[in-house]
Image (cartoon, grey):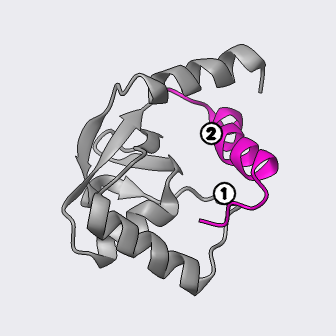
């Protein structure tokens, strides 16, 4: 992915151009390279329960116009589901398949200690 495309996605997230989306309308992406230890997931869930979402979930429209595909934030969505939330804050971007992996890959390559 080229730098301008990644920068554009980063700007959208940083400027808070988001909305609440019902969990029922969010689908997992087929390619999610991240995994999380059960202890880390429990800590994430507790943090969301106590302080809410500090970062929106990044999504794109899927083939079904009423459904979104999660690009980044799979574990936050899973935690919200376990906490019985009805919706989560999301930023919707237009992105092709190659672009959708960039934020997740970039985050996990540059922050190797991040396991949440």
In the figure, 73 relative to 83: above or below? above
* Label 2: which secondary element: helix
Q: Are the residues at dot 2 and dot 1 in contact (C-beta closer than 8 Å)?
A: yes
Instruction: Give the residue at the far left of this rendering.
Output: 86
Name the quadrant of the N terminus: top right
* Label 1: which secondary element: loop
Instruction: Give the residue at the far top of this rendering.
Output: 4
Instruction: Give the residue at the far bottom of this rendering.
Output: 38
In the figure, 26 relative to 19: above or below? below
**Percent of width and height locating residue 13:** 47, 30
Label 2, label 1: how far apart the Cα atoms are: 9 Å
Task: Write down the residue under mark 2.
Answer: 100
- At 56% from the left and 85% from the top, the residue drawn is 38
Mark 2 neighbour class, 10 Å CA radius: few under 14, some 14 to 19, many 20 or more: many
In the figure, 81 relative to 96: above or below? below
Q: Which mark is residue 31?
A: 1
The magenta stretch is 93-116
- At 47% from the left and 23% from the top, the residue drawn is 12
- At 46% from the left and 81% from the top, the residue drawn is 42
Q: Looking at the image, can residue 53 be seen?
A: yes
């Amino acid at each position: 992915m080229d730098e301008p495309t990644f920068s554009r996605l980063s700007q959208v997230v940083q400027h808070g151009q988001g909305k609440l989306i019902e969990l029922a309308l969010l689908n997992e992406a087929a390619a999610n390279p991240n995994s999380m230890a059960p202890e880390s997931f429990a800590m994430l869930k507790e943090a969301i329960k106590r302080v809410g979402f500090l970062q929106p979930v990044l999504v794109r429209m899927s083939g079904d116009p009423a459904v979104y595909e999660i690009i980044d934030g799979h574990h936050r969505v899973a935690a919200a589901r376990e906490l019985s939330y009805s919706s989560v804050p999301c930023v919707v971007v237009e992105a092709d398949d190659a672009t959708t992996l960039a934020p997740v890959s970039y985050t996990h390559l540059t922050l190797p200690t991040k396991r949440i």
